[in-house]
Image (cartoon, rainbow, N blue to C red):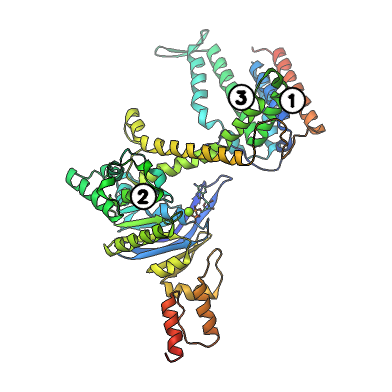
């Protein structure tokens, strides 16, 4: 039985690597630059550059390539669908037709472009969460958003909520699997019939899950209050963020690389 | 008629960084009408083994068969096995979801397609076995006390009339009257001819109640046999996470000093033996 074993998106893989050691703020902002850069390239040179950069990053992060690839797994249908739409619905010079479907040269180019773009976007974002623990990620976001605090933006609260939510995802998956198994042991058939029947069949899983989630939330709130948690003001941190020379270097490099990729890509136009 | 487990190996998430070998060559047999205790430290693979006994997990290697039905892929055989082997998870009260106790306990038999007359009868019998009276049939399960919830959950497995009952640490979190009552229920079920597979980390309980004991250590079945034999082995070597009852240690020490007393975990037997050796 497979259940929920194939979730990789948003999973942290704790290994020692230079990428893991970077400051989360550096990684978050650098990834944003990269995402913008990926969006702006259109031609083969640009994609080759981003692809190579990505491979180098994966190598440096010491994360098995298979795991990185599997970040695309949950959304590959989306990628395929996007590519297919562009393949069949882009007007231009026909190269192939099949019934009412017509594939144009422009369509092939657009499909490749959009598919690659989407995959690169997902994999770059995936690499961020594969190499950054949820706590670091939340700390990084809080720190990045903290200038907005003076306008009343709840940076700390949002980061804390995100930490808790991320912290709870694995627990939630485990609990779901456990309840599903318990109901299957009582003869429940969760995977048969049409959508409506399946939805109904899931009630025995959903009700206990809600009860457990509320209990956990309540326990957590009690535990936090018992330890005098009162919000963001004046809290010290376990692992204060520290921006090093390496972070500056990585930051500047990814910024320059993004510009370079977009610039060179613009000079090499498609035939 | 038995559940036979041969050289069972289970690997979670094979081929990923999370790969874990939870069971590593487990062999034992549980007959109808007998009580098998599975004992081992936390993480020794007890819960994983439990899920193999009714096909919630399938062997990576080795085999599990229930009354000669192989547990393997295939809807038909899996459903047959699941109906024969009732599995009560740890903290089973967390699986409750219905509006009334009666509906909750009917969930299993309904899924197995029990006909109208048989359904009511088996639900009533199950509730009677666990000591839930008719006055609670229409009660909301979520409003019951902890011990009552546990009993309703167990009844909801019993109502499917399984031939074997696998209980994963059923006494966890119960007070001592609740514990005694539950163990009494297991004895009753054994007398009714059901095979009991009782998962626990309490060696003393296992020694006192089981016909055979399986000791798991890091996924291996290191010991398998009747309580007397297991006890002798336990005194010979240390097994991680297993506490030998004080009385047994005491009896062993007496024997080392030359007293002729049996290795026992029962105060009465030990007292009588000491009495005899003093001519009383
Ligand atoms: N769903 C799972 N996925 C991955 N590893 C698991 C899973 N369930 C249990 N394990 C691992 O398998 C081993 C045995 O666990 P378990 O069968 O729960 O032992 P026990 O019930 O004796 O405490 C442990 O190392 C545990 O971490
Ligand atoms: Mg367990």
First of labels 3, 1 by sequence position? 3
Do tag 3 and tag 2 residues touch (Cβ < 8 Å)? no
Specify whether residue A251 is in view.
Answer: yes
Chain letter of disc 3 in the image:
A
Chain letter of disc 2 in the image:
B
Which residue is pictured at 53% across the width and 55% down the height? B43
On residue A121, the disc is 3
Answer yes or no: disc 2 within 8 Å of ligand 2.
no
On residue B148, the disc is 2
- Asked if labels 2 and 1 share a chain, the reply is no
Dot 2 falls on a residue whose secondary structure is helix
Which residue is pictured at 49% across the width and 75% down the height? B248
Which residue is pictured at 49% across the width and 19% down the height? A84
- Which residue is farthest top? A92
Do tag 2 and tag 1 residues touch (Cβ < 8 Å)? no
- Which residue is farthest left? B117
- Which residue is farthest bottom? B279
Q: In the rendered image, which quarter is residue B264 located in?
A: bottom left
Please tell me how crowded label 3 is: few (under 14), some (14-19), or many (20+) other residues with Cα within 10 Å.
many
Number of numbered markers: 3
Give x and y (percent) for residue B198.
40, 60
Say which residue label 1 marks. A254
On residue B210, the disc is none
Chain letter of disc 1 in the image:
A
Answer yes or no: disc 1 within 8 Å of ligand 1.
no
Dot 3 falls on a residue whose secondary structure is helix
């Amino acid at each position: 039985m497979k259940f929920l074993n194939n979730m990789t998106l948003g999973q942290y893989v704790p290994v020692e690597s230079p990428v893991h050691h970077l400051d989360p703020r550096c990684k978050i902002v650098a990834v944003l630059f990269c995402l913008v850069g990926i969006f702006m390239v259109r031609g083969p040179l640009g994609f080759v550059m981003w692809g190579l950069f990505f491979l180098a990053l994966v190598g440096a992060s010491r994360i098995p390539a298979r795991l990185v690839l599997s970040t695309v797994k949950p959304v590959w249908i989306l990628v395929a669908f996007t590519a297919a739409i562009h393949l069949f619905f882009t007007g231009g010079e026909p190269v192939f037709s099949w019934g009412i479907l017509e594939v144009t040269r422009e369509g092939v180019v657009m499909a490749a472009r959009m598919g690659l773009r989407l995959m690169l976007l997902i994999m770059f974002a995936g690499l961020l969460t594969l190499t950054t623990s949820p706590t670091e990620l939340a700390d990084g976001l809080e720190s990045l958003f903290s200038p907005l605090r003076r306008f009343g933006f709840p940076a700390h609260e949002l980061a804390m909520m995100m930490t808790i939510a991320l912290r709870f995802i694995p627990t939630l998956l485990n609990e779901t699997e456990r309840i599903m198994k318990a109901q299957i042991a009582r003869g429940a058939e969760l995977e048969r019939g049409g959508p409506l029947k399946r939805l109904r069949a899931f009630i025995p899983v959903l009700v206990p899950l809600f009860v457990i989630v509320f209990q956990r939330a309540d326990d957590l709130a009690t535990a936090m209050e018992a330890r005098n948690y009162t919000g963001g003001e004046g809290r010290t941190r376990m692992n204060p963020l520290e921006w090093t020379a390496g972070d500056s270097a990585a930051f500047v490099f990814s910024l320059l690389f993004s510009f370079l990729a977009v610039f060179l890509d613009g000079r090499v136009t498609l035939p | 008629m038995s559940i036979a487990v041969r050289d069972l190996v289970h690997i979670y998430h094979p081929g990923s960084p999370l790969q874990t070998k939870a069971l590593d060559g487990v062999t034992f047999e549980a007959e109808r009408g007998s009580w098998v205790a599975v004992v081992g430290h936390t993480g020794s693979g007890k819960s994983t083994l439990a899920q193999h006994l009714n096909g919630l997990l399938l062997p990576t290697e080795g085999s599990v068969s229930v009354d000669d039905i192989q547990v393997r892929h295939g809807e038909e055989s899996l459903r047959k096995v699941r109906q024969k082997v009732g599995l009560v998870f740890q903290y089973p009260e967390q699986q409750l979801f219905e509006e009334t106790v009666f509906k909750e306990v009917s969930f299993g038999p309904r899924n197995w397609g029990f006909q109208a007359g048989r359904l009511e009868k088996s639900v009533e019998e199950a509730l009677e076995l666990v000591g839930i009276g008719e006055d609670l049939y229409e009660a909301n399960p979520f409003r019951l006390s902890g011990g009552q919830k546990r009993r309703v959950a167990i009844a909801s497995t019993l109502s499917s009339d399984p031939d074997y009952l696998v209980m994963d640490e059923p006494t966890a979190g119960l007070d001592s009257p609740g514990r005694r009552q539950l163990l009494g229920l297991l004895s009753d079920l054994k007398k009714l001819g059901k095979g009991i597979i009782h998962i626990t980390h309490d060696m003393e309980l296992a020694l006192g109640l089981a016909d055979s004991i399986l000791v798991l250590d890091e996924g291996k079945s290191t010991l398998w046999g009747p309580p007397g034999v297991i006890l002798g082995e336990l005194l010979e070597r240390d097994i991680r996470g297993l506490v030998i009852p004080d009385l047994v240690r005491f009896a062993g020490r007496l024997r080392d000093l030359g007293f002729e007393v049996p290795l026992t975990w029962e105060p009465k037997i030990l007292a009588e033996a000491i009495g005899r050796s003093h001519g009383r």
